[in-house]
Amino acid sequence: MNDKRIKLLNKKGFSEKGKYILYCMEACQREDYNPALEFAIHLSNNYKKPVLVAFFITDKYRFSNQRYYRFMLEGIIKTKKKIEERGVKFLVQKDKFLEGCLRLGKDAFGIITDKNYLKTQRKWREDLALMSEISVFEVETEVVVPLDYISSKAVPYSYLYRKKLEKLIHSFLRDYEKIEPEFNSTGMDLESIDFEKPEDYLKILNIDKTVPTVEKYYTGGSEEAEKRLKEFIEKKLPYYKDYRSDPSKDYQSNLSPYLHFGQISPAKVVNEILKEYDYEDANIKSFLNEIVVWRELARNFCWHNPNYNQYEGIPKWAKESLEKHVSDKRPYLYTLEELEHGLTHDKYWNAAQKELLETGKMHNYMRMYWAKKLIEWTDHPKTAFDYACYLNDKYELDGRDPNGYAGISWCFGSFDRPWQERKIFGKVRYMSDKGLERKFNIKKYVEKYL
C-alpha cells in the first residue's frame, strides 16, 4: 500500500467488536485503481474482518436533478457488480453520507472514506471523524500526486504547480496493484437497494426531473470511460496540441464527467497514455497539463480557498479592478432566464449554452468565452459569478467540481495576471467574438447547436 495517500482523521482506535471494515464510497465511484478499496481489503486481510462497501444516495443535495443522478447511478450499478465479483459486499442505501456512515459504523471495526475537496463533503468527513467512536481513515484517490506533497498552501499559478509536480509525478504513477480479499462478504445480510436500472433509483428520489438526461451523449460507468480513453489515445491524442482548443473540432478527451464522478482514475488515464506515447511528446505534455497540472491545481485552490465558488474568492487586484468599472455602461443586460435559455444577441454564446443544455457538457474553450461574457452582460461581476456557478452546477455533468469552480474563477482573474485596462473588465483578461472568428471556424460550431 502507498501510505502517502492515507490519513488517519482521528485517534480513536479500532473496535475489536466490529463485524467488518466499512468503506463509505463517495468521490471514488469505481472498482479499478481505487486505493481506498484496496486499503480496506488490506486491513481486512490483516485484521481478519470482511469488507463492506456502502454508497449512499440522497435527494437532499443542492441542485439534485435527474441529469447527473442518472449518469452517476449508471456507473454505480456497474461498480457494485464489479466489486461484488471480487467477493466484497456492496450496499446502496438511501441516506445522507454522514448519517449513513455513522449508522453502519456502529458495527464496524474501522471506517474508510475517499477524499473530497469541496466544503460540504469535507465537513461530512470532519464530522464523521469527530462523531464516530472508531478509527476513520481518509484515502486520497482522485489526484495523481497527493495535495500535501505539492504544497501546504495555495499555489497561485499553474507554472509553479507544474514545477513542483514534475519532480513527483513519476513516483506516484506506478500501476495500482489489486489485493485479493481473503474473506468473502457478499453473503452478509444487510439492507440494500439493488435496482438494475437507473430509472428505478430515480423514481425513489425527490429530485428535479425537469432537467433532461443526456444518455444520447454520455453514459455513465468505468467501462464507458475506458472506451472514450481508448478512442482518445488512438484517434485524437496525436493531434491534441494543435486542436484541443478548437470548438469546431472534436479533439477533447470528453473524460471530465467520468473523472468528476470518480468513474475513472486520473492515474490510470496517464498510465494508459504512457504505455503508447513518450512522456516528452508535445501532445502528451499538452494533455498532462490539463488532466494533471490544472486539474490538481483546481483541487489545491478549493482546499485552501474557502470562497472557491464565490466572487469573494477571486484575487484582490481583480476584484478592485472589476468594481472600479461597475458603473461602466454595459452593451447588453440579460436576465438569468434569458441566459439559461440561450436567448442573447451573441450566436456564439447561445451555441455554447445550447451545447450545455443539450449534451450536459460545454467545450472547454467556449466555457471560458461563456463565463467572460457574463461579466459583460450583468450589472455587477458578483452577479456574473453567481450566474456562472448556477448554470455550471445545474447543467454540467462535470459541474459541482473543483475544475469548474477554478475555471470560473480564472475568468475573473484567478491564476492570471493583470492585463491592459479596459471598460467593464478593468485589468481582467478579455475575450471577444472577433477572437473566436480569427482562431477557429466558429460558424461550424454554431451550426452544430443552433
Image: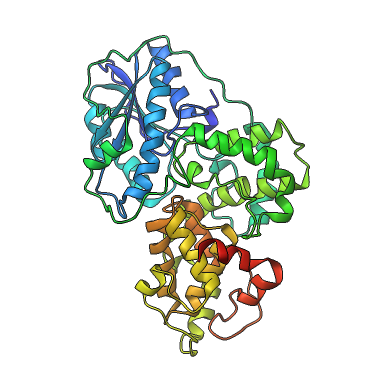
Q: Quadrant of residue 81?
A: top left
Residue in view at x 25 percent, y 41 percent: 96
Is 381 drawn above or below residue 354 in the view shown?
Answer: below
Residue in view at x 56 percent, y 47 percent: 254
Nearer-the-camera pick, 433 or 144: 433
Q: Quadrant of residue 98?
A: top left
The colour style of the image is: rainbow
Is 336 drawn above or below residue 251 in the view shown?
Answer: below
Residue 339 at x, y = what percent? Answer: 41, 72
Nearer-the-camera pick, 446 or 389: 446
Residue in view at x 44 percent, y 50 percent: 397
Is 381 drawn above or below residue 114 in the view shown?
Answer: below
Q: In the figure, is residue 337 to the left or right of 372? A: left
Nearer-the-camera pick, 22 or 258: 258
Is 311 drawn above or below residue 149 in the view shown?
Answer: below
Q: How many marks?
A: 0
Residue 125 at x, y = what percent? Answer: 34, 40
Residue 89 at x, y = what percent? Answer: 33, 20
Nearer-the-camera pick, 80 or 448: 448
Residue 27 at x, y = what percent? Answer: 42, 39
Kindly tell me whether residue 412 is visible in this rendering: no
Q: In the figure, is residue 122 to the left or right of 289? A: left
Kindly tell me whether residue 329 is visible in this rendering: yes
Residue in view at x 67 percent, y 66 percent: 441
